[in-house]
Amino acid sequence: MSNPSWFSRLGRYFHRPIFFSLTALTTLGAMSLLSAAIQDGGITPLELALLILYAILMLWITASFWTAALGFVRILRRLRQQATSSITSRQQSQPVLADTTEPCKTALVMPVYNEDPKRVFAGLRATYQSLVETGQADGFEVFVLSDTRDPDVWVQEEMQWRRWARELGEPARIFYRNRVENTARKSGNLAEFCRNWGGRYRYMIVLDADSVMAGETLVEMVRRMEADSRVALIQVPPVPVNRSSLFARMLQFAGSLYGSMFAAGLSYWQQDTANFWGHNAILRVRPFTEHCGLPQLPGNEPFGGEILSHDFVEAALLARAGWKVHLADDLGGSYEEIPPTLIDYAKRDRRWCQGNLQHSRLVLAHGFKSLSRIHFVMGVMSYLASPLWLLFLIATGIEAYFRSLTVPVYFFGDNVLPVWPQSYAVEMATVLWVTLALLFLPKFLSLVLLAFDANLARRFGGLPKAAISVLIESFFSVLLAPVLMLFQSKFVVAILLRTTVGWPTQERGDHQTGFAEAFGAHSVHTLIALVAGLATYFYVPNFFWWFTPVLAGLALSIPVSMITSRMALGRLARRTGLFLTPEETNEPRVLRLLEENLAQAELPAMTNEDNFWLRAVVNPCTYALHAAQLPDEAPSRRRRHALEGLIFKLQDGGLNGLSTREKRTLISHRDGLHELHTLLWSNGESLNSTIKSN
Amino acid sequence: MGARIKAISTPFERDNTPADWSLITQRLAAYLNALGVTNLTEIAQLSEQVQRRVTARAAVTMLEDAIEAAIEETLVLLDDWLLAELGSHSDANTLAAARAAVLGGEIPNWTARWVSTTAAERADSGFAAVLRACHLVAVPPLAPLPMHTSSIDLCCQRSRRRMSGAICRFFCQPETRNP
C-alpha cells in the first residue's frame, strides 16, 4: 500500500466512477431544484417537457464542468510534480526508436483539399525544420496527400512541392500525390495512402492543412508509441494560434487557458479509450489499416452514405479491436489555426454538424466500447444542445406566459384569512445561479491556476490582465452564444429535414466581416430578437428581463459580428496585454519558422495572376513540370475525343464556359495537356483574346 | 505567357509547304524564347531544324496549321535530343522528368548543348546522369498494406432487414405460402 505507483494504478480504476458519479449527482441536484420550483400542485405536460429538456442540458453542462474541474485538480498536481517529469529527462532515459525488423519510419501526412498552397507548405516546412533541429528527422518522411480538385491550386501545390523537394535534395523525404478521384473524402484519402504506402511506415502523424507541430513533440509522440505496443493512437490537443482578429484572439485565449484544463479532465476519465480529433495525432499504421477501413452507412445522406466525421469512428474501431487510444494532454507543441470571424466559425460548424449528427446512428451499434458510445453522444450533443436550449427557452417563455394568465385567488373555501399564492422566485433564481455557476466556474478555476503558477500567469500577460481578459471574453461569449445557438439550430433542422449540408472548403486566412456579409448572416437574428423582445415585453414582462441577455446577443449580432472580426481591435488588445497566450508572449520556434516561411513563400513571377492553371499550361516550364507529375497512360481514342471536345469548348466559350471539373480534366492527362499547350501557342491570339475577355 | 503572340494565318502552297516562313519563324522564336533559348544564333539554328522537320512532315501528310506543326516539331526535337542523351531505353516518365528538369532551369547551358552537341558527344553518360539526378521522386516505391472495410452493425439493422424481408415475402411471393 505504501508504493505510490501501485496506489496510482489502483486509483485509475476510480477515475470514471468519480467523474460519472459527480456528473449524475450534480444533474439530479439541479433537477430537484427545478422540479421543486415548477411543480405547483401537480405537473403539466409543458412542465414535464421543461424538466426533460433541463435534465438533458444539465447533464451536458455538468459533464463539461466536472471535466474542467477534474482537469484543474490534475494540472494543480502536475504543477507540483513538474520538475521531475520533463520530456527531456524521459528522452534521455529511453531510446527514441527501438531497433526492430519492422520498418520504423514515421510518415507526416497532410491531407489537403483546395487549401492555400502557400500556407500548407509553409506550415509543413516549419514542422519539418523543427524536426530537423531535433536531429531525429531521418526517421520521418513527409507526404502531402492532395485531394485538391481546383486546377489552379493543384498546379501551385506541385510547384511548391517541387521547390521544396529540390531544396532538400537526396534522399527524397518530401512526397506529393494528387488523387484522381477524391472518393470518401479525407478518410478515403488516408485509406488510399495506407493501401499504397502503409507498408513503408510504422506510424503516421496526421496533420491538418493549418496544423503546425514542434519537432520535439513529434519525436516524443513516436517515443510514447514505441514505449507501449498496445497504443494505436495518441492525440495531442492542438492549441489555436496565429490569428489577429478580436474574435479569434478571444478564442485563442480561451482555448489556451481553459482548453488545457478540459484536455486534462478528458484525459483523466477517458484513459485508454480517448478520442481522435482528426489531426495532430499519431497512429500506428498496421492496426489502422486492419480496423479502420470505413464502411458506408446504409441509407442516403445526410444520415447514410459516407461517414463524414471519420475520426471519432476510427478511434472507436481501434478501441473495439482492443487497442489503446490516448489523449496526451501533457504534451505541448501542437498548434492549429481557427476561423477568424464569427461567420467563418459558423461555416465550420455547418460542415462538422452533419458528420457529428450522423454519429447518432452509431451510438447503439454492436461491439463498440461504452466510452466510444459516450464520445458519439458528446459529438451529437455538441450540436443538438443548441436546438434543445432554444426549445427550453421557448418552453420557459410559454410557461411564464401561462403563469401570468393565472389570477391569484386569495379567498376560497372556508378560509377567513387570505391564502397568499406561493412564490417560487427563490427556487427559480437558485436554478439559474447554479446553471450559470456551472457554466462560468471553469473560467474562474483557470484564473486560480494562474494564481498558483506565477510563471504561467506571466505568459498570459499577468494575473490582473488575464482576469480582465476572462471578464471580457465571458461578456462576449454571452453575446455570441445565442447567435451560435440559432446558427446551429438551423443546421440541425436542415439536416433533420434531409437537406445535405455539403462540405465546403473552409476560409482559413485572416479577413474581416463587412456590413453586407454581417447583414446577410445576422439580419434574421436581429429580427427574431425584436419580435421575441416585443412579444415578451408586452405579454410576459416579468420574463422579458430574464430574457434580455439572450435578446441582447441577437439584437446586437450585426455590430458584434463586425466588431469582433476587426484585426485592428485584436492587435490593440494584444498591445494592451489582453487575451495574451503563452504562444504570443514567448513565440515557439516552430511558429517563428512558419512566419519566415510564409514571408518567403511567394512564387516568383507567378503571383497575383488569375487562371493560374491556364498560364501554367501556356508556360513551357510549368507545363513540363506538371506533365512530369502526371501518370503515363496508354492513349485512348475516347479520352482524346473528350479532351478535344473540352478544348473546343474552351475556344468557343472562353474560361467561363468550362467548369472547374472540366478544367481539371484538361490538365489531368499528358495528351490533353500537350494538345492544349500546342494549341495555345499555335493559335494564341484568338484564344487569348477569348480568355482575356472572360 | 511571356511574349505576346500575334495572330497570323499560315497559308500553304500547292505542295503543302507553308507559304511564308517568316511568320512562322516569328512565332517559333517567341516559343523558343519561352522554352529558355535566348541566344539568337541558337534560335536561328533550332528554327532551321524545325523548318526542315515541318517541311518533311508536310511532304507525307496534310498539315492543318503550319504553326501548330512547328510547335509540335519543336517539342519533338527537344524530346529527341533528351532521348538521345538519356539513352533509347528511357521510358516516358524519365523523358518527362528530364524535360521538366531542363525547362525548369535546373541544368545550366542546356540550350547550347541542345543546339550544338553532335551524336558522338551525346553518348556522354555524365550528362545523362545529371539529367537523371534532376528527376524528383514524387512518391516512394509502393509498399501496399491491405485495408479491408470494417463492418459496423447498426442497432436494429438486422431485425429491421429481417422484418422487411418477411413482409416482402408475405406480400410479394404468395406461392411460397400456398404450396
Image (cartoon, helix red, strand yellow):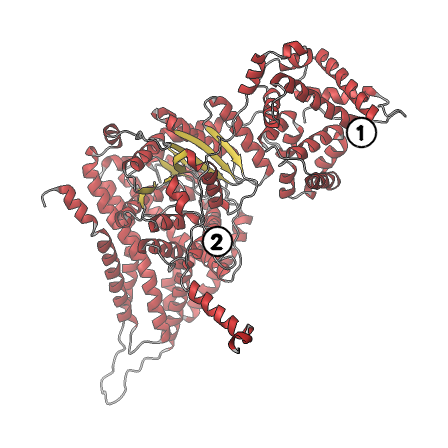
Position of A553 with respect to A16 (left or right) is right
Residue B101, given in percent of the width and then of the height, sits at 58, 21
Residue situated furthest bottom in the rendering:
A414
Residue that carries the numbered disc 2 in the rendered image: A296
B118 or B44, which is in the foreground? B118
Residue that carries the numbered disc 1 in the rendered image: B65
Residue A139, located in which quarter of the rendered image? top left
Q: Nearer the viewer, mark 1 or mark 2?
A: 2
Residue B79, located in which quarter of the rendered image? top right
Badge 2: few (under 14), some or many (20 or more) residues near its Cα, within 10 Å? some
B178 or B121, which is in the foreground? B178
Position of B99 with respect to A330 (left or right) is right
Q: Is residue A555 visible?
A: no
Residue situated furthest right in the rendering:
B14
The residue type indicated by label 2 comes to Gln
A166 or B171, which is in the foreground? B171
In the depicted structure, whether residue A135 falls above or below residue A327: above
Residue B126, given in percent of the width and then of the height, sits at 56, 12
- Name the secondary structure under disc 2: loop
In the depicted structure, whether residue A536 falls above or below residue A510: below
Which mark is drawn over residue A465? none
Residue A200, given in percent of the width and then of the height, sits at 42, 33
- The answer to whether the residue labelled 1 contacts the one labelled 2, judged by CB atoms less than 8 Å apart, is no
A498 or B122, which is in the foreground? B122
Q: CA distance from mark 1 to mark 2?
A: 52 Å
Position of A321 with respect to A10 (left or right) is right
Q: Chain of mark 2?
A: A
